[in-house]
Amino acid sequence: MAMPNINTSATGIELNPERRALITQKLAPLGRLLVHEREVKMDVIIRRVESQMTGGMFYVSVKLATDNGTYMAVSTGHYLTRALTEVREYLRRSISKGASVTSGQLFRGRLAKTDAYALTS
């Protein structure tokens, strides 16, 4: 299991030890899905924005980079826990599918569609 190196930055919210522990608790288990990876880096950006209409909203953006690909997810929520859970679930599904944003398979798929279009037109 590759234990992710989690780098966290925040705006409008203090990153106290409890919040850091929550981030680690929610996102570190993704390393179980990346058994064959040697290095896993995770960049987490959290923003809290106050609004008169909705109260406070958390915006969470996560970029998970491995040797073989990069996965990204974004979520919003009134509660930090819920936003982190949504990001975790999206990343889990992307990793399970192998849907990396820098995957050669995605590029080859697009290229094949372009070639098929060029041949039929």
Image (cartoon, rainbow, N blue to C red):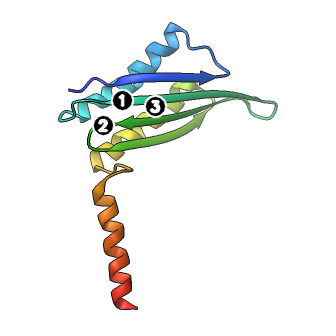
Q: Residue 4: x, y in percent?
A: 32, 25
Q: Are there few (<14), some (14-19), or many (20+) residues within 10 Å of tag 3?
A: some
Q: Residue at x 55, y 9 (%)?
A: 16
State which quarter of the image contains the C terminus.
Answer: bottom left
Residue nearest the viewer, comparing 114 with 29 = 114
For residue 54, above or below residue 21: below
120 on left or right of 58: left
Q: Looking at numbered disc 2 in the image, what kind of residue is underneath it?
A: Thr
Residue behind mark 3: 85
Give the amino acid at mark 1. Answer: Lys
Give the x, y percent position of residue 51: 78, 31
Please provide percent x and percent y for residue 90: 42, 42
Badges 3 and 1: C-beta atoms under 8 Å apart?
A: no
Which of the two discs, 2 and 1, labels the residue nearer the N terminus? 1
In 3D space, how far apart are the residues under numbered discs 3 and 2 (Cα atoms)? 21 Å
| Local secondary structure at mark 3 | helix
The kind of residue on which mark 3 rests is Thr
Residue occupying the point 22% across, 34% down: 37
- Residue, far left: 36
Asked which quadrant contains residue 64, the reply is top left
Q: Residue furthest top?
A: 17
Real-space CA distance between mark 3 and mark 1, rounded to the nearest whole angstrom:
18 Å
Mark in the foreground, 3 or 2:
2
Please say if 50 is above or below 63. above
**Which quadrant of the figure has residue 47?**
top right
Q: Which residue is mark 2?
A: 66
Left or right of 71 in this view: 53: right
Q: Secondary structure at mark 1?
A: strand
The residue at 38%/43% (across/down) is 71
Instruction: Kindly identify which numbered label has been placed on residue 41.
Output: 1
Do the residues bearing badges 3 and 2 touch, measured as CB atoms within 8 Å?
no
